[in-house]
Amino acid sequence: MSKKIRTEAVDGLFDAILCLRDKEECYLFFEDVCTVNELLSLSQRYEVAHMLTEKKTYLEIAEKTGASTATISRVNRSLNYGNDGYEMVFSRLKEKEDAKTE
C-alpha cells in the first residue's frame, strides 16, 4: 500500500468498522483482521494516549503499559501535533460517561 492513507481500501475498512454494532462484534472482526500483537499494539497506544492526557509521566506510563519511551514519544507527538483524533474520542467517551451518571 502506498503512503497515502485516504484510499478506497482504507475507506472500505472504515466502512466495515462503522457497521459493527457492539463490542463483541468488534472482537470478532478485529481478531480476524489483526494479529494479536497488532491489536495489542493499537490498544497500548490508546492507553498511552489516555494516560498522557491525564498528565502521567513517561515512567508511570512505561511501567503500567509496557510501552517503550519511543512509543510514548510517538503517541505524545500525535497528541500535540496530530489531527486531534484522540482528543475527539476521549471527549465523546467522557460525554457518554457523564450522561450515564446523570
Image (spheres, rainbow, N blue to C red):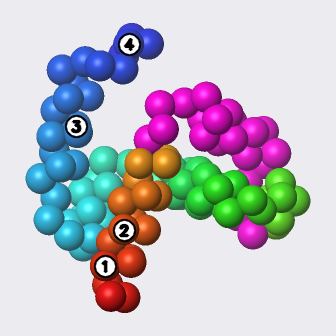
**Inter-mark Cα distance, 2 to 3:** 26 Å
In the picture, which quadrant includes the N terminus?
top left
Residue 71 lies in magenta, yes or no? yes
**Inter-mark Cα distance, 2 to 4:** 33 Å
In the picture, which quadrant includes the C terminus?
bottom left
Badge 1 density bin: few <14, some 14–19, many ≥20, Cα 10 Å: few
Residue carrying label 4: 4
Residue 44 horizontal/vertical position (percent): 59, 57
Residue 87: assigned label = none
Q: Are marks 2 and 1 in contact (CB under 8 Å)?
A: yes
Q: Secondary structure at mark 2?
A: helix
Q: Are marks 4 and 1 in contact (CB under 8 Å)?
A: no
Q: Secondary structure at mark 1?
A: helix
Q: Disc 3 marks which amino acid?
A: Leu
| Mark toward the start of the polypeptide (4 vs 1) | 4
Residue carrying label 3: 13
| Mark toward the start of the polypeptide (3 vs 4) | 4
**Inter-mark Cα distance, 4 to 1:** 38 Å
Residue carrying label 2: 95
Q: Residue placed farthest to the front in the image?
A: 102
Residue 79 horizontal/vertical position (percent): 60, 40
Please tell me which residue lies in front, 17 or 28.
Answer: 17
User: Is residue 44 something that shows in the picture?
Assistant: no
Q: Disc 4 marks which amino acid?
A: Lys
Q: Nearer the viewer, mark 4 or mark 1?
A: 1
